[in-house]
Structure formats: structure tokens, C-alpha cells
Amino acid sequence: MKKLSYFSLVVILGLGLVSPLFFVSEAVAQEQQEQQANQLPISWENWRQAKAEAEKYDQEGDYVRALQYYLEYIRQAEGLGKPDIAAWGKNNAAYMIIKQHKADQATDLAPAKKLLEEGLAINEATEDCRARLQSNLGYVKLFLKD
């Protein structure tokens, strides 16, 4: 009888620990599915929309929101097989981070550095784009220690 009681206690305690973990993992899985469902399909129309929104928020000085749209611009360009356009998107996204840094020196420039280096690694980037990427990377390197 005692063995059955101990076994029941272990099962109940085990379920008590497993259930919250199960619900947490279910919540994470559901959140990931929602994020995937919320991603726009790849299209020129969605690329143009992301570009327009990014430029609008940049002009309004909302660099965080502009950055979000430039990241979508990059995703769309990459999905469309346009690495030259993606390189410009990486430059523009990095520049939003630089603008944030100019307004608030506490802004981390590491993500900008990563975007700029990724842009420079794109063989199809135009000379003008490469010059801008390099210039922005020069600014970033003034503040980051390798």
C-alpha cells in the first residue's frame, strides 16, 4: 500500500512539473506559428510596401519602426532573388541603427556592423552601394572595439 502511495505521489508531482513545461512549449510553438503566419508572402508589391513604410518612418524620425520595415525589405529582396537590392536594404537598415546611435550613444552598433559586413559580402552590390556600406562601416568601427 505504501509503495502505491509513493508511486501516486511521484506521478502527481511529476505531472505537476511536466504540465507547466508542456504548456510553455505549446505557447512557444504557437507563437512561432503565428509569427510565420504573419510574415508576408514574397512579392514585389510587399517589397514596395516595405520600402515605402521604411522611408516614411525614417522621415518621421521613427528609426526603430523604419528599421523593422527595412528588415522586411531585405527579406522580400532576398526572396525575390535580388541580392543587389538586399545589399541596399542592409545598408539602409544599418543606417537606421546609426541614426539611433547619433541620437542616443547607448544604442548598440553591433547589429549595424553585422548588416554592413553582410552587405559588403554580396557580390552583386553596386559600386555606389559598396561605397555607402563602407562609409557607414567606417562610422560604426569608430565606436566598436573588435
Image (spheres, rainbow, N blue to C red):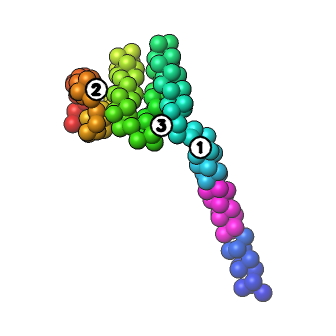
**Where is mark 1, residue-wise?**
35
Q: Is residue 29 visible from the viewing direction of this image? A: yes
- Which structural element holds mark 3? helix
- Mark 2 is surrounded, within 10 Å at the Cα level, by few (under 14), some (14 to 19) or many (20 or more) other residues, namely many
The first of marks 2 and 1 along the sequence is 1
Q: Does 137 appear in magenta?
A: no
- Inspect the image, locate mark 1, and give the three-letter code of the amino acid beneath it: Gln
Badges 3 and 2: C-beta atoms under 8 Å apart? no
| Residue with the most extreme right position | 1
Where residue 144 sits in the image (x, y, percent)?
Answer: 25, 30
Name the mark nearer the viewer: 3 or 1: 3
Where residue 85 sits in the image (x, y, percent)?
Answer: 37, 31
- Mark 3 is surrounded, within 10 Å at the Cα level, by few (under 14), some (14 to 19) or many (20 or more) other residues, namely many
Name the chief secondary structure element in magenta. Answer: helix
Badges 2 and 1: C-beta atoms under 8 Å apart? no
Q: Residue at x 47, y 13 (%)?
A: 59
Q: Is residue 24 visible from the viewing direction of this image? A: no
- Inspect the image, locate mark 3, and give the three-letter code of the amino acid beneath it: Gln
**Where is mark 2, residue-wise?**
129
User: Seen in the image, is 43 located left or right of residue 91?
Assistant: right
The picture quadrant where one finds residue 19 is bottom right
The picture quadrant where one finds residue 117 is top left
Where residue 70 sits in the image (x, y, percent)?
Answer: 45, 29
- Inspect the image, locate mark 2, and give the three-letter code of the amino acid beneath it: Cys
- Which structural element holds mark 2? helix
**Marks 3 and 2, how far apart in space?**
18 Å
**Marks 2 and 1, how far apart in space?**
31 Å
Name the mark nearer the viewer: 2 or 1: 2
Highlighted magenta segment, given as a residue range? 13-26
**Where is mark 3, residue-wise?**
76
| Residue with the most extreme top position | 60
